[in-house]
Image (cartoon, grey):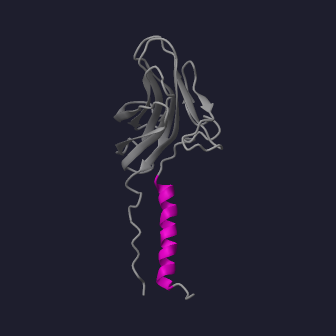
Amino acid sequence: MPAASPALAVFALLFATALASTAQAGTADIVNGNFDTSLLGWDLSGTPSPIWSMLDYQNNPGSGSALLSNAEAQAGARVYPMRQCVSVATAGSHALEADGFLPAGHAGGRLVVSYATRAVANCSGGANSLGGYFLQSNGAWVHGSINFVINPPYTYLEVTLGIEKDDAGGLLSGNLDGVQVIDRERIFAHGFEVTDPS
């Protein structure tokens, strides 16, 4: 078998380097967004408090998810029992993604993923932009995503995970997993084109 050309070897090296740097540059530093063994890294509140669950959105036996519950007495109640303040290193377009699961035949409700961009490291003070989305599930994992823009000095992202139920009384529980922030401008920013050096 003939030896690989120097140009092909350079291409392979640059391709591997691009993939590695893309994986590192593509996300902000959300702590424990995959909930592998616990809920560490997240601020928890409410009654009942969120707990760690063995249910994983990728059916990974070595990981799990966050189980959120809503036991509010009134109809249409929404609670946000999980919060994390994230430092976003780069300005520009980003996406907040997550996967959610509600059991089949649940009484009615949805999981909620929300964000606010803030200028203070503990995510206090006023927000520059706010947004979020619902994850409507009925016995299957569903994926959600929302785009937003980081504009200095609002380089801190408050991520809140919630659950909303339709009916008064009772308990609605659901799982969230795979929470991540994607830097949309740095992924494949330079492509994989390589000039032949020969």
Across and down, in percent, residue 94 comes to 39, 47
Q: How many callouts does the rendering have?
A: 0
Please say whether residue 24 is one of the residues in the magenta stretch.
Answer: yes
Looking at the image, which is closer to me, 48 or 57? 57
Across and down, in percent, residue 112 comes to 43, 30
Q: Residue furthest front?
A: 105
Please say whether residue 75 is one of the residues in the magenta stretch.
Answer: no
Q: Quadrant of residue 131?
A: top left
Q: Quadrant of the C terminus?
A: bottom left
Q: Which residue lies at the image location 42% right of the left edge and 42% below the top edge?
A: 96
Q: Which residue lies at the image location 57% right of the left edge and 26% below the top edge?
A: 50
Q: Which residue lies at the image location 51% right of the left edge and 16% below the top edge?
A: 71
Across and down, in percent, residue 136 comes to 41, 31
Q: Quadrant of residue 148?
A: top left
Q: Which residue lies at the image location 46% right of the left edge and 19% below the top edge?
A: 107
Q: Quadrant of the N terminus?
A: bottom right
Looking at the image, which is closer to me, 174 or 28? 174
Judged by its main secondary structure, the magenta piece is helix
Tell me: 157 left or right of 151.
right
Height in image: 112 above or below 76?
below
Looking at the image, which is closer to me, 17 or 125? 17
Give the magenta part as a residue range: 5-26
Across and down, in percent, residue 3 comes to 55, 87
Height in image: 155 above or below 188?
above
